[in-house]
Image (tube, helix red, strand yellow):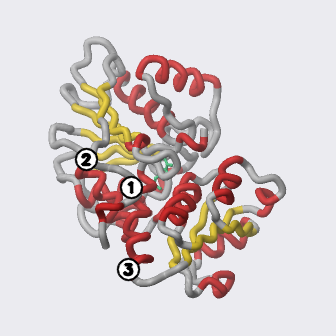
Amino acid sequence: MDTTNWLADTAQIPVQELPGFAPDGSNTCVSMLRLDTIHPFISGNKWFKLKYNIETALAEGYTSLITFGGAYSNHLIAAAAAAQHYRLYITGMVRGEEARRQLNPVLQQCRDMGMRLEFVPRDVYRSILSDGYRNAVLDPYHDHLLIPEGGANEAGRKGAGEIAGHILPRYTHICVSVGSGTTLAGLRQTLSPSVHIAGFAPLKGGSYMKTVIAGALERNKDVNWSLTDDYHFGGFGKTNEQLQGFMQSFHSRYGFMLDRVYTAKMMWGVKDLLECSKWPEGADILCIHTGGLTGN
Ligand SMILES: *Cc1c(COP(=O)(O)O)cnc(C)c1O
């Protein structure tokens, strides 16, 4: 298809240095790849993960998509915006029926962009995922192109791998937040094995994602990547005053926002690891701003 009229403009993704982020006297350099700038709703890594799923839909003549997410899912909102742009019908299956009663701003925005919302009980949602999306609940959607939660399929990893094309070879360490792990996996398959990729999972007990990511990697499975779940702040979506204060001072110092679910916790972790001297001297660190600001 004609990729010149792709929806998001990724020609010039800014990289911003973060002077003073590393402690005084350290000779590490910290910068941020601003994927949050590419589109107001399809921001960050979401566009990369959707891109080849959309291409498949258009190339194979699908008129409808179905995808999945929680009530505050950045993936749902990105998928709704992409479907609207490419004139595809889309159903979003939302985890939990309680979200139906009063639509939160994320789901309202999804609906405003034309997404049909279907609310399923949590146990049904879980069974759909654990059945690998081969659950009878999905029978009515057999003619829809199915995009898994988080865009976590081969097309998603392929697109996420293209983020590597925006990363200069000077960097020794890449930091990325982890939800489904699709972005980390895509990057690991594409970036040079000499670059270390550090994943930050913002959920309690998130280290199980190591197995999920390793399972998704077709190559570089055991090559130079790590995952920590030390910086979860009480669990997925949870926050506290310290984290809020950190986000505010980051914003006033560098002039852009972090999202509270993923990138704020990652940057807190990066700072902590720098302060404990866990990174080698001379490390040149690039943190990926994966977007998510609609969730704030
Ligand atoms: C979705 C999302 C992630 C997680 O990406 P995965 O590819 O699912 O690991 C990270 N950061 C932000 C801001 C997100 O919206």
User: Split into 4 quadrants, where in the image is the C terminus?
Assistant: top right
The residue at 29%/35% (across/down) is: 15
Which residue is outermost to the top?
24
Residue that numbered label 2 is attached to:
166
- The amino acid on which the numbered mark 2 sits, given as a three-letter code, is His
Identify which residue, 159 or 274, lies in the foreground.
Answer: 159
Q: Earlier in the sequence, mark 2 or mark 3?
A: 3
- In the rendered image, which residue does mark 1 sit on? 183
What residue is shown at x 39% (from left), y 53% (from top)? 8
CA gap, disc 2 to disc 3?
26 Å
Whether ligand 1 has any atom under 8 Å from the Cβ at mark 3 is answered as no
Callout 3 amino acid: Ala
Count neighbours of disc 2 (C-alpha within 10 A) and say few if under 14, some if 14 to 19, many if 20 or more: some
What x and y, as percent, mark residue 120?
73, 69
Task: Tell me which corner region of the image, top left, top right, bottom left or bottom right, holds residue 244.
Answer: top right
Q: Is residue 248 positioned above or below 237 on the image?
A: above
Q: Of tags 3 and 1, which is closer to the observer? A: 3
The mark found on residue 205 in the picture is none
Element type where label 2 sits in the image: helix
Above or below, 193 relative to 57: above
Q: Secondary structure at mark 3?
A: helix
Relative height, residue 218 to residue 177 (above, below): below
Q: Quadrant of the N terminus?
A: bottom left
Q: Nearer the viewer, mark 2 or mark 1?
A: 2
Comes first in the chain, label 3 or label 1? 3
Q: Does 5 sit left or right of 91 as displayed?
A: left
Left or right: where does residue 18 sit relative to residue 204? left
Asked if the residue under mark 1 is in contact with the one under mark 3, i.e. CB atoms within 8 Å, the reply is no
Determine which residue is flagged by label 3: 59
- Mark 2 to mark 1 CA distance (whole Å): 14 Å
Q: How many marks?
A: 3
| Residue placed most toward the observer, 286 or 276 | 286
